[in-house]
Amino acid sequence: MKITKNISSGRYTWAHDMIKSLLEKRSEAVLLTDIGARDGILKEYCTDLSIAYRAFDLEPMTTFCREWNIENPFPYSDSKADIITMLEVIEHLNNPWLGIKNITDHLKEDGYLLLTMPNPSWSGARLNLLYKGVLSCFSQEDLTLNHHVFTPWPHIIDKLLQDNGFRIIEAITLDGRTHLFAKPWSPVRFPVQLGFRTLKKMIEAADPASRGMSYAIIAQKKI
């Protein structure tokens, strides 16, 4: 899997734009299943799109969001989805292979899967590993508070998707490149911050995959 580019958008804006582009390829009604929806924030981003939106989460936070632990088979009688979104979900899974298998079973033939996840290759994560010994987003605190139990290295995600019947259409990084003088910054710690950001920019110049705290994938289910 090759990271083709970096964009400054966050995951919800990226997902909206990708769904919009996929809608242009389909004339019939499109059913979207949002996994890990929590409070349905993606729904708010997609109010301008002609989709039938369904939301699922391990711990739903709204009345329209239903419970589904995707490490178990789909528990309802709903139709299969045309598009499934999993935004910052996969790093929480105890068994990603089983979870993605159940996602595959819930997706129509030639349907699309949109994924975002923390980028272990991010410049900040690399420096964090160097001086703290752990990657950003995968510390003990992330494990305890957020249940980050699976590190989504791109080559492993590539195999995970291929093993479960997907072909990757595009992979990009999100959240933009490092900017030397971006906020927040502290007048007291500014020299340290500037040095840290300079190192990040050097890493990003050498490896495009390190640009962006998260990365995103569009995959299509093989017929």
Image (spheres, helix red, strand yellow):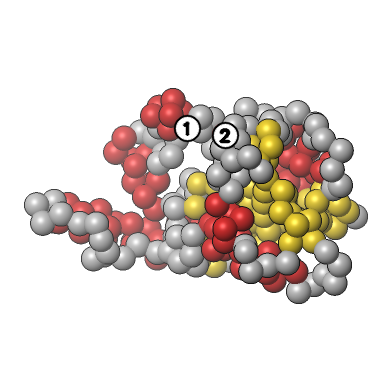
Query: Considering the numbered disc 2 on the image, is that residue within a helix, a strand or a loop?
Result: helix
- Residue at horizontal 34 percent and vertical 46 percent from the top: 127
Q: Which residue is mark 1?
A: 146
* Quarter of the picture holding the N terminus: bottom right
Pick whichever, 74 or 212, lies toward us. Answer: 74
> Mark 2 or mark 1, which has the lower sequence index?
2
Query: Considering the numbered disc 1 on the image, is that residue within a helix, a strand or a loop?
Result: helix
- Which residue reaches farthest front? 63
- Residue at horizontal 40 percent and vertical 41 percent from the top: 136
- Residue at horizontal 57 percent and vertical 61 percent from the top: 45
The picture quadrant where one finds residue 223 is bottom right
| Kind of residue indicated by mark 1 | Asn
- Which residue reaches farthest bottom? 24
- Residue at horizontal 38 percent and vertical 29 percent from the top: 141
Q: Which residue is mark 2?
A: 92
Q: Is residue 140 above or below residue 175?
A: above
The picture quadrant where one finds residue 138 is top left
Q: Is residue 169 left or right of residue 28?
A: left
* Residue 155 visible from this viewpoint: no
Q: Is residue 28 above or below residue 82?
A: below
Q: What is the crowding at mark 2: few (fewer than 14 residues within 10 Å), some, or many (at least 20)?
A: some
